[in-house]
Image (cartoon, rainbow, N blue to C red):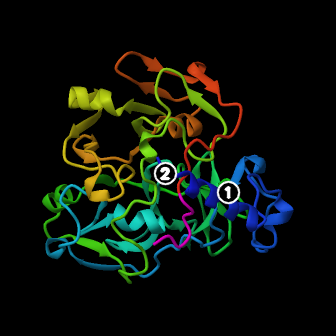
Amino acid sequence: MLPNLNNMLLLLCILATGQTIAQPPNDWQRSWPHTDFSQSSVNLDDIATGGPGKDGIPAIDQPQFIQASESRNIADDEPVIGLILGNEAKAYPLRILIWHEIVNDVVGGTPVAVTYCPLCNTAIVFDRRLDGQLLDFGTTGNLRKSDLIMYDRQTESWWQQYAGDAIVGELAGKKLRTLASRLESFAQFRRRAPAGLVLIPSDPRARNYGANPYVGYDRSPLPFLFKGKLPKGVAPMMRVVAIGAVAFTLPYIKGKGRVEHGDVIVSWAAGQRSALDTRQLAQGRDVGNITVTRQGKDIPYVVTFAFAFFAFNPQGVLMSTDDDLRQQDLSYLPVRSFTHEPVNRRNVT
């Protein structure tokens, strides 16, 4: 748990900048004059500030890489987003993404947005092409259901990271294509792609790379800045493996080692540390590696928290060790909770 002083500093930062938990669209116009707020697929009152403003958490637009075999700064069991497209393989360490949240890149000839939201633990890769237009993304500094809201720089429409859909602006209602990737240990990525590349910081001094600004977050009883339904019978911050509207609790997968659901196979193996546990990522507890395949090929999935799965899949089914949890098993959290808050995410070193 973070010291109370950090919690107070975050609240003071929000108050000092004039930001409130739910801002009316008129206030947003000053920072987003090019965003069409008349077009929205969600209730704007559900959007909250996360602390930093527009691009306060800077996306990486010119990523730099080295051969993964030459890396000496990343522990074997540290988490990376592993992406293999065509004849190219790249690893994006969470020690970097936890500070930047978005990397605009091209892999195997495909323009991609590699994204990570620490508050939902969602590592998702999108194709940046949409209806013949090439998009690139930045961070709005806002959250919905505790999940990152991105924006595209071409239309300044706002996008929900969990589902990859535009929720505000000219492109509201559009959806990005999700690409198969893995949240895996660095060692597992190297075994899969011996000639692969790994992302490195363009300026190693810009952030305290390797440190976790969300110490103890995945042990918290409740998520940060979340208002909505929380699942009964399972801890809101329990990790789950979500494939569309079906998910499995991590203890269930870990206990069995391998689960077959129709033609989908979900497997667990030890050897990957949590990025959201201890102050140093390399010292986090082992949460294991997940693979999800269909007919031997990787398919998109996300290792997220139970609260986020139900928030974005209200009709979803969660398979647990005891029973299946569904929409009717949810209860309301009546007030916003500040039980646990990360430090201000802007320019933390």
Specify the principal SS of the magenta part.
loop
Q: Please name the residue shown 79% across and 74% down the image.
A: 33
- Which quarter of the rendering shows the C terminus? bottom left
Callout 2 touching callout 1 (CB < 8 Å): no
Q: Is 345 part of what is drawn in magenta? A: yes
Question: Residue 290, percent across and down?
Answer: 27, 43
Q: Residue 261: in sight, yes or no?
A: no
Q: Residues within 10 Å of mark 1 (few under 14, many from 20)?
A: some
Alpha carbons under labels 2 and 1: distance apart: 14 Å
Residue 310 sits in which quadrant?
top right
Amino acid type, label 2: Leu
Magenta stretch in the rendered image: 343-349
Question: Residue 36, percent across and down?
Answer: 78, 65
Question: Residue 158, percent across and down?
Answer: 66, 61
Residue 50 sits in which quadrant?
bottom right
**Residue indicated by mark 1:** 11
Taking depth in this image into account, of 7 and 162 the one nearest to the observer is 7
Please, what secondary structure does the residue beneath circle 2 have? loop
Please, what secondary structure does the residue beneath circle 1 have? helix
Is tag 2's residue or tag 1's residue first in the polypeptide sequence? Answer: 2
Q: Does residue 89 sit above or below 62 in this rendering?
A: above
**Which label belongs to residue 110?**
none
Q: Residue 100: in sight, yes or no?
A: yes
Q: Does residue 255 sit above or below 308 in this rendering?
A: above
Amino acid type, label 1: Leu
Q: Is residue 321 left or right of residue 76?
A: right
Q: Is 235 part of what is drawn in magenta? A: no
**Which label belongs to residue 2?**
2
